[in-house]
Each structure stands twice: as structure tokens, then as C-alpha cells.
């Protein structure tokens, strides 16, 4: 791919809508607040895990990619699972875990940059989407 398509760009930005919905649920309060927190964590964890899958696929498809790409590909799932563990054990959740997940997402374009993903417009799109989702996730974590 030499250029990011308009469809990819539009769908990428539409991918921020679930996190906006989670934020609105949090503002609504009451039982909606817990739903918003759970939605925010689940969606951020899914997207971060998806990014890991992308990196893993790049490592398989391009043998010249640095070998650490496979570790980078696995870490998002492990980080997301570790962040879910306190909730599973009945402990307070998910404020700090949302903040950690949001920071990881916001920094994730650094992996793309390090492995040389450079279709025209790709890094700008990844930066905008990752910072957008990361900031929304951290904000929800701070409010939760």
C-alpha cells in the first residue's frame, strides 16, 4: 500500500465513536457510569490487541522486520489481560488500568515508526487515532 485510502481514514476516525459513547455514559451517571467504564476498557483493550495482531502480521510478512516485533505483537494482549485481572478478582477497577492502557495506545505509533511503516498518510492517521483514543481512555480513567 502506497497511500492510506479515504475509506480507511473514515473508518479509522469512526472507530473513536465507541470511546465517545463510553464517555457520554460516564457523564450520564448512575448505572450508565459503570457501563461506560466497562465499555471504555473493553474497547481500548480490543483496539490495542488488534494493533498487536497487526505488528505480528508485519513480522510474519516481512522477514526483514526487527525480531522484537513479535514481542511487540504479543504485549498488547498481555497488558490488556493484566489490566482486566483486578476487576476479575473483585478489586477496584478500572481507573488506573484505563490510564495505563490509554498511555500505551497513545504511544503505539512509535512501533509503526520503528519498523518503517510509511505509506503516505499512515503515520499521521495512526498518530491522530492513537492519541485520540489514548486521551479519551485516560480521561475516562481519571473520571472513573
Image (cartoon, rainbow, N blue to C red):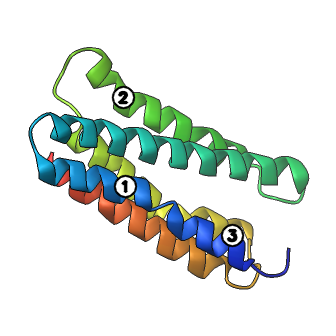
Above/below status of 113 relative to 60: below
Q: CA distance from mark 3 to mark 1?
A: 18 Å
Q: Between residues 129 and 32, which one lies in front from this camera angle?
A: 32
Sooner in the amino-acid sequence: mark 3 or mark 1: 3
Q: Secondary structure at mark 2?
A: helix
Answer left or right for 131 relative to 87.
Answer: right
Tag 1's secondary structure?
A: helix
Other residues around mark 2 within 10 Å, as few (<14) / some (14–19) / many (≥20) = some
Mark 3 neighbour density, 10 Å: few (under 14) some (14–19) many (20 or more): few
Query: Which SS class for mark 3?
Result: helix
Where is residue 81? Give x, y as percent. Answer: 45, 29
> Most extreme residue toward the bottom, as rendered?
120
The residue singled out by tag 1 in the image is: 19
Q: Residue at x 88, y 60 (%)?
A: 64
Residue at image mark 2:
84
**Depth check, front residue: 62 or 27:** 27
**Quadrant of res 53:** top right
Calculate the distance from the C-alpha at mark 2 to the C-alpha at mark 3: 30 Å
Of the image marks 1 and 2, the number of the one nearer the N terminus: 1
Q: Is residue 9 left or right of residue 99?
A: right
Residues 105 and 137: in front is 137
Q: Residue at x 52, y 69 (%)?
A: 13
Residue density around tag 1, few if under 14, some if 14–19, many if 20 or more, within 10 Å: many
Give the quadrant of the N terminus.
bottom right
Q: Which mark is residue 8?
A: 3
Residue 108 position, x and y percent, is 52, 61
Marks 1/2: CA–CA distance: 17 Å
Label 2 or label 3, whichever comes before in sequence order: 3
Of the two numbered discs 2 and 3 in the rendering, the one whose residue sits closer to the viewer: 3
Residue 54 in the image: x percent, y percent?
71, 51
Quadrant holding the C terminus: top left
Amino acid at each position: 500500500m502506497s497511500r492510506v485510502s479515504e475509506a480507511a481514514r473514515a473508518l479509522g476516525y469512526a472507530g473513536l465513536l465507541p470511546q465517545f459513547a463510553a464517555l457520554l455514559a460516564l457523564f450520564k451517571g448512575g448505572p450508565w457510569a459503570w457501563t461506560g467504564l466497562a465499555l471504555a476498557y473493553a474497547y481500548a483493550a480490543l483496539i490495542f490487541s488488534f494493533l498487536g495482531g497487526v505488528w505480528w502480521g508485519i513480522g510474519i510478512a516481512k522477514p526483514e522486520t526487527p525480531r522484537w516485533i513479535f514481542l511487540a505483537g504479543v504485549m498488547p494482549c498481555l497488558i490488556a489481560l493484566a489490566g482486566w485481572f483486578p476487576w476479575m478478582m473483585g478489586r477496584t477497577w478500572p481507573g488506573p488500568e484505563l490510564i495505563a492502557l490509554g498511555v500505551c495506545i497513545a504511544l503505539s505509533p512509535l512501533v509503526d515508526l520503528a519498523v518503517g511503516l510509511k505509506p503516505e498518510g499512515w503515520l499521521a492517521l495512526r498518530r491522530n487515532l492513537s492519541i485520540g483514543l489514548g486521551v479519551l481512555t485516560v480521561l475516562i480513567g481519571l473520571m472513573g
